Amino acid sequence: MIEPRFFPSPEPLDLDRLLAITGATVASGAGEGLGITGVGPIDAAGPHDLTFLDNPAYAASLAASRAGACLLAPKFRDRAPANALVLVSPEPYRAFARVAAALYPHAARPQPIFGQGVAPGAVVHPDARLEADVTIDPGAVVGPRAEIGRGAVICANAVIGPEVRIGRDSTVGPGATIVHALVGDRVIVHQGARIGQDGFGFAMGPGGHLKVPQIGRVVIQDDVEIGANTTIDRGANRDTVIGEGTKIDNLVQIAHNVVIGRHCVIVSQVGISGSVTLEDFVVLGGHVGVVGHVRIGMGAQIAGSSNVREDVPPGARWGGTPAKPVRDWFREMTTLKRIASEGRTRPASDASEGSEQ
């Protein structure tokens, strides 16, 4: 059996192309005849691969690397392997990402099974409007009066509901569903995501729970990325909004009426309850839970597995359950650890002192 290659073999990048892509400077090594055809980690990269170092935890492995070229922060330039081309950048990871994108452009977003155009087996309603160069894969469904912009890709078995708008150069992955939504340009929706379904709204009472119709939309601005199997509910009586440039990981739940600002980062298994507001550049670590009607201020960062129950000030770093400023959280954890340790080492006679005989 022949092992498959999921990404096409890239054209080699020479020194001039690397410098143009990264903006880095040459610190040492000769670039003549260099042809970079791949990327890899420090310990596995080969003579035709580019690697990078930005984290001091991996600095000890750098000298033994077989990589043909290394992107390094200035402080690591003297630790590079002797035979490698050393490129120095103030942001080596971002420079590395640009090179990887140039080598493997198809890895950046879900890819269609067939070429451009509407494939056999796709269902496009006659009242839908498609601009030029739109790709619709087999099994995909585009509903009445939906509009899809130039260069967009709708992958196999995705469903685009009635009246939905998909912007230019956006991609909807296999099996994703988008209803009651307006989607901007260059948006990436990964496999199995669910966008625009009704939110969890009920008027509860002893006679039963009365469903509240959800009549809002989901508005997704430009350059947003939404991970696999993430769910974003439409608003109840106003819109759920995902701001420009925000990146959302897999398996995230965003409830109705949530407003997320620009360039936020939301890691996997986060749950955001209804009517929460995240201002710009907020970061939520994995498995964070946010209760309803909370506001998290601009640039705030919430540590993984925390539970946010009250408003968070701009620029704050909080963690724990319930979440609090990290300094207070660390102090509490240290105190609890000391108390627990003292309890384990306390003599038995002391431990039983005061008990009934």
Image (cartoon, rainbow, N blue to C red):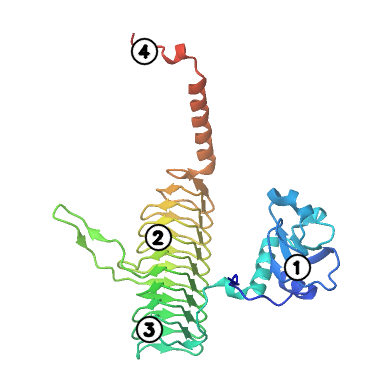
Image position, residue 105 (x, y; %): 61, 75
Q: Secondary structure at mark 4?
A: loop
Q: Please, is residue 130 above or below residue 245 in the view?
A: below
Marks 4 and 3, how far apart at CA: 75 Å
Q: Amino acid at mark 4?
A: Ser
Q: Earlier in the sequence, mark 3 or mark 1?
A: 1
Q: Depth-wise, is mark 1 or mark 2 nearer the camera?
A: 1
208 or 194: nearer the viewer: 194
Assess disc 4: are there few (<14), some (14-19) or many (≥20) residues with their C-alpha within 10 Å of its C-alpha.
few
4 or 167: nearer the viewer: 4
Q: Residue at x 44, y 55 (%)?
A: 270
Q: Residue 95: which quarter of the image?
A: bottom right
Q: What residue would you read off at disc 2? A: 253
Q: Secondary structure at mark 3?
A: loop
Can see residue 23? yes
The tag on residue 48 is: 1
Residue reaching furthest to the top: 357
Marks 3 and 1, how far apart at CA: 46 Å
Q: What residue would you read off at disc 3? A: 146
Assess disc 1: are there few (<14), some (14-19) or many (≥20) residues with their C-alpha within 10 Å of its C-alpha.
some
Can see residue 88? no
Would residue 356 appear left or right of 57 to someone viewing this image? left
Q: What residue would you read off at disc 4? A: 355
Assess disc 2: are there few (<14), some (14-19) or many (≥20) residues with their C-alpha within 10 Å of its C-alpha.
many
